[in-house]
Amino acid sequence: MKGAGARRVFEALKRNNSITKLSLKSNSFGETGGKYIGHLLQINTTLTEVDLRHNAIGSKAAETFATALKINKSLIKLNLGDNKIHDAGAKKISSALLTNLKLSKINLSANGIRDGGAIALSEVLRMNKTLTELNLNENKISSKGATKIFETLRTNSTLKRLRIGGIKTATVTTTTDNTLKIK
């Protein structure tokens, strides 16, 4: 399915009030299709779970999703894994998550996110009280970005699951007093 296919999904679901879960993984609809689905999330009030893995939406379409996250009151789980959103998209989504009071699970794995995106997400973890799961596996986050995220875990009591595998040059240990040490 390319961008035109995503447009047809948009047209079909923009007035739908019964579909709660939508999986469009591995359709390669790219930026144009990503924007259609992002716009759908801005107006649809029944979708609670959306899986968009492996669609190469890019950082520009991620901005449309950020807008959706600022206004959508129904979405609980969003999978944007492997979509090439990079730091720019991660920063836009992070900004939206500062005010989103509904989303509890987000997958941003394999998106080329580096330290800039990780640091923006660490601010989300400092402020957001609804996010319980964050997947950042297979990104390009170094120990600098990982340290910022791990530091916020000292004060964040809502995040229950963090996936951040593949950190280069970092070793994380926990001391007897539950202090995280990153080397």
Image (tube, rainbow, N blue to C red):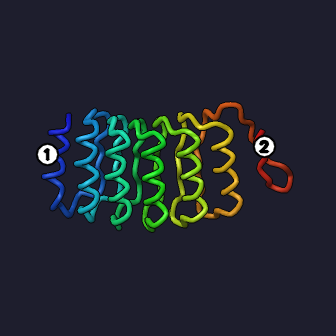
Query: Residue sitting at 38 percent across and 55 percent down?
Result: 66
Which SS class for mark 2? strand
Q: Name the residue under label 1.
A: 8
Q: Measured from the top left, where is residue 89 in percent x and y?
A: 42, 46
Q: Which amino acid does label 1 sit on?
A: Arg
Cα separation, mark 2 vs mark 1, equals 49 Å
- Quadrant for the N terminus, please: top left
| Element type where label 1 sits in the image | helix
Q: Which of 71 and 14 is in front in this view?
A: 71
Residue in view at x 28 percent, y 41 percent: 24
Residue 30, quarter of the rendered image: top left
Number of residues whose C-alpha sits closer than 10 Å to that of mark 2, classed few (under 14), some (14–19) or many (20 or more): few
Which amino acid type is shown beneath numbered disc 2? Answer: Thr
Residue on which the image places disc 2: 173
Q: Is residue 127 above or below residue 176?
A: below
Whole-percent x and y of residue 146? 65, 44
| Residue ID at (24%, 61%) | 44
**Mark 2 or mark 1, earlier in chain:** 1
Front-most of residues 11 and 126: 126
Sort mark 1 into few (<14), some (14-19) or many (20+) by Cα contacts within 10 Å: some
